[in-house]
Image: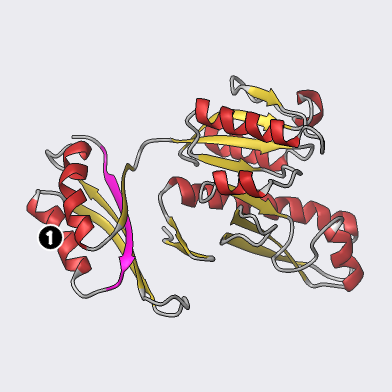
Amino acid sequence: MSGPLILTLDCADQPGITARVTAFLYERGCNIVDAQQFCDRDGGATEERFFMRVVFEAGDNTSEVLREEFAPFAQQFAMNWKFAAQDRARRVLILVSKFDHCLVDLIYRWRIGELNIDPVAIVSNHPREAAIHTDIANIPFHHIPVTPETKPEAEAQLRALASETDAELVVLARYMQIFSDEQSAHFAGRCINIHHSFLPGFKGARPYHQAHARGVKIIGATAHFVTGDLDEGPIIHQDVERITHADSPADLVRKGRDIERRVLAEAVRLFAGERVALNGNRTVVFRG
């Protein structure tokens, strides 16, 4: 028997979806081990939207047969849907500039088995000796310089690399380059950025110094999907840290790096676990 499968779906809400989905699995001898659902009644859309995530043991069924049989069923509800193996590592392309604390944390969590990912490559706009200060073992490293004049070519290189490596997710682990609208559209729904503040607020350069100058009592970080609207993409995960008047800008930077690491890692974990669904400008996140 193979490992559990994950079914994720969304569609216009209507009576009977949960019953029909669970009956579909029951009739084929599948055993549901976890199920979560959500109906968005306040999203501002013209229709209420239903979201569901089901983890189940497939019994004697193959994933290919289940997909084939589920397709006409899903068509009745105009579903967006996906079957995925729970234990399959998701292929991830990681981008970094000169601050590698998030990259180091992702690699560590991957190595100890905390993140179910397969880092297929690391890309930086700086040479390796300037971008990475830790051992990345056998993960391929690619230096793709970016200047205003070469940006289109550099972005094309990145798209080609993502295609060659079959990357399912692109992670901007403090990658200090702004994607063009074309690049953002190309990676829509599969590119996560870590923003060094609790959005919205303190955008631009030296955010922790801005926060210090304003005397804030909370700092934070935000992991979100990349869109053409800079730092405005659907939010996946956020966290905060309380600070006091005694904290210096250096203290804020130190605490901020720690928040960035854990927020990005959690966003990647959620994505790899098929727990994040796009819902217009927002996300539905099934925790667990």
Q: Which residue lies furthest to the top in this view?
A: 138
**Camera-side residue of 172 and 164:** 164
Helix, strand or loop under label 1 = helix
Q: From the image, give the main secondary structure of the stretch colored magenta.
A: strand
Q: Where is residue 215 in the image (x, y as percent from the top left)?
A: 87, 73
Describe residue 114's horizontal placement relative to residue 177 as left or right: left
Describe residue 147's horizontal placement relative to residue 274 as left or right: right
Describe residue 31's horizontal placement relative to residue 237 as left or right: left
Q: Can residue 112 be seen in this snapshot? A: no
Residue located at (71% from left, 36% from top): 152
> On screen, 256 above or below 3?
below
Which residue corresponds to mark 1? 23
Badge 1 density bin: few <14, some 14–19, many ≥20, Cα 10 Å: few
Q: Quadrant of the N terminus?
A: top left
Residue located at (83% from left, 70% from top): 244
Q: Position of residue 36 (x, y in %)?
A: 32, 63
Q: Which segment is the magenta one?
A: 3-13
Q: Can residue 253 be seen in this snapshot? A: yes
